[in-house]
Image (tube, grey):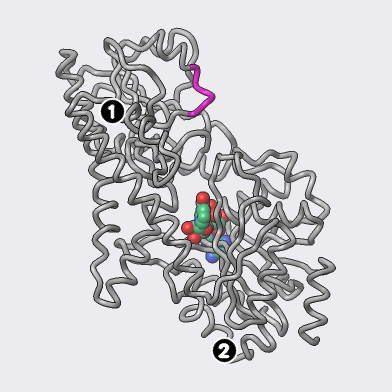
Amino acid sequence: MSFNKLIKKYKKKKIKIGIVGIGYVGLKLLLQFAKNKVQVLGFDNNLEKLNMLNKRISPISYIKNSEIKKTSNYSSYNNDYSKLKECDAIILCLPTPLKNKKPDLSHIINTLKKIKKYFKKNQLLVLESTTYPGTTEEKIKPFLDKKFLIGKNFFLGYSPERENPGDNSFAFKNIPKICSGYSTKCTKLCLILYQMIVDKTVAAKNIKEAEFSKLIENIYRSVNISMVNEMKMISHKLNIDINNVLNLANTKPFGFTKFEPGPGIGGHCIPIDPYYLYWKAKQVNIDAKFIKLAGQTNEDTTNWVINNFFKILTKEKKIAKKTKLLILGLAYKKNIEDTRESASKKIIINLHGKLKKIDVSEPYIKMQNSVVSEDSIFLNKYKINNILITKNIIQKYDVVMILSDHDCFDYNLIKKESKILIDTRNRIERKNRFYKL
Ligand SMILES: NC(=O)c1ccc[n+]([C@@H]2O[C@H](COP(=O)([O-])OP(=O)(O)OC[C@H]3O[C@@H](n4cnc5c(N)ncnc54)[C@H](O)[C@@H]3O)[C@@H](O)[C@H]2O)c1
């Protein structure tokens, strides 16, 4: 097929897309294509997740079952990778974690080993996972080189995801999508693919710049969050409320962007992605000090919360071994169920065995999804109950600590019933026995 014919096929949306890895990023993407009447196949190795999706049950709390149902004419979910042969475009949305603080591309590499036999001429392969500059060309292209002429009879691209889980203030189609390709033709096809689902696509000059841009976005967040967390630790000593300070600074109409302090960073992005660039910088003999310092400061913030928790116990004349603590929120941020790398988990691990009892209230874990089972295991490992907050429950605890300020918590009840309340999310006003950390 000529390239022009291929373009026409894409423009008419007469294509089939395969998305490999239907997690937070992949599923959202899949639904966008399906909503726009493009046939899309979702592939995953998590059978529990596939089962749920095939029963039209959403595995993610902020994606409604109705969204899965509504798009069912254009979507299907399976682990039969031979169906990738039917696809015109294949998008990889696989995890890119760290192993010993170094990039772990095993999910991508192992998947490519498994699926490369299904690649065929004129397909477009796009990586969406966050990774260091050079990955697509150095790690993915070699899988294609023997069989294809990239840019001529096979197309390769990179397009980073900008998902902000749990935040519905930006509709998917309103978030500009960066597209890049190995050649001009690759970039063109990548742009046309994403123009089906977003209002604005932005062409990067090359793949490495697109890969780097995603890391800069996350490093920017990591550095700024760690900076406000450091400011919080200073202002706390000075008996100044950091949140009031930030609100004042935020009245400046230029040159200042407000970041929220908290108990420490979490999730699959901010604690992990910066180290991808840190590692890459090391390869070219650069010690990326900002990245390291931000990561360290954010870890220090969680330890600072723990140390201050004990200081508050002492001030309140409480003996740790006799203290019953209720933690509000296990997720790394509000209104989602994602507990990966969460400060709550780190705090629970640290405090375990030092108090009489620790329970947690994480309403999102009640929701059926694949993360649930892992979290139940996590909680059970530390013999912690997941408590539903209702009347007369909170007063059974000596201390309540807000770590993820889900909107669904009844803050009036929490304020009314807490004996000692510690807030790390600026959700309550400071007063007698109500502390802000
Ligand atoms: N979560 C976010 O907010 C976010 C935002 C932007 C970018 N990203 C990046 O996107 C990528 C994916 O992140 P995510 O949060 O969607 O991860 P996730 O863990 O939610 O989803 C990954 C999916 O891939 C599946 N999977 C893993 N190995 C597989 C394999 N070998 N074959 C098939 N399926 C496999 C998992 O079962 C899971 O469903 C990462 O690189 C991440 O850094 C994430």
What percent of the width, then of the height, locates residue 149?
Answer: 63, 91
Q: How many callouts does the rendering have?
A: 2
Helix, strand or loop under label 1:
loop
State yes or no: Cβ of the residue under disc 2 lies below 8 Å from any atom of ligand 1. Answer: no
16 relative to 356 in the view: left or right: right
**Which class describes the residues within 10 Å of circle 2: few (<14), some (14-19), or many (20+)?**
few
What percent of the width, then of the height, locates residue 118?
Answer: 67, 78
Quarter of the rendering containing residue 125: bottom right
Measuring 37% from the left and 26% from the top, which residue is drawn there? Answer: 327
7 vs 147: above or below: above
73 relative to 205 in the view: left or right: right
Q: Main secondary structure of the magenta part?
A: loop
122 relative to 106 in the view: left or right: right
Q: Please name the amino acid that badge 1 sits on.
A: Leu
> Which mark lies nearer to you, 1 or 2?
1
* Residue 4 is inside the magenta segment: no
Q: Residue 20, labelled with which disc?
A: none
Name the residue tied to disc 1: 437
Measuring 42% from the left and 55% from the top, which residue is drawn there? Answer: 218
What percent of the width, then of the height, locates residue 235?
Answer: 22, 31
Quarter of the rendering containing residue 436: top left
Q: Residue 145, labelled with which disc?
A: 2
Q: Which residues are magenta?
A: 406-410
* Nearest to the observer: residue 436 or residue 51: 436
Compare marks 1 and 2 and give the one earlier in the sequence. 2
Q: Please name the amino acid that badge 2 sits on.
A: Asp
* Nearest to the observer: residue 56 or residue 344: 344
Spatial distance from mark 1 to mark 2, Cα to Cα? 54 Å
What percent of the width, then of the height, locates residue 262?
Answer: 35, 35
417 vs 194: above or below: above
Task: State which quarter of the image contains the C terminus.
Answer: top left
* Nearest to the observer: residue 229 or residue 320: 229
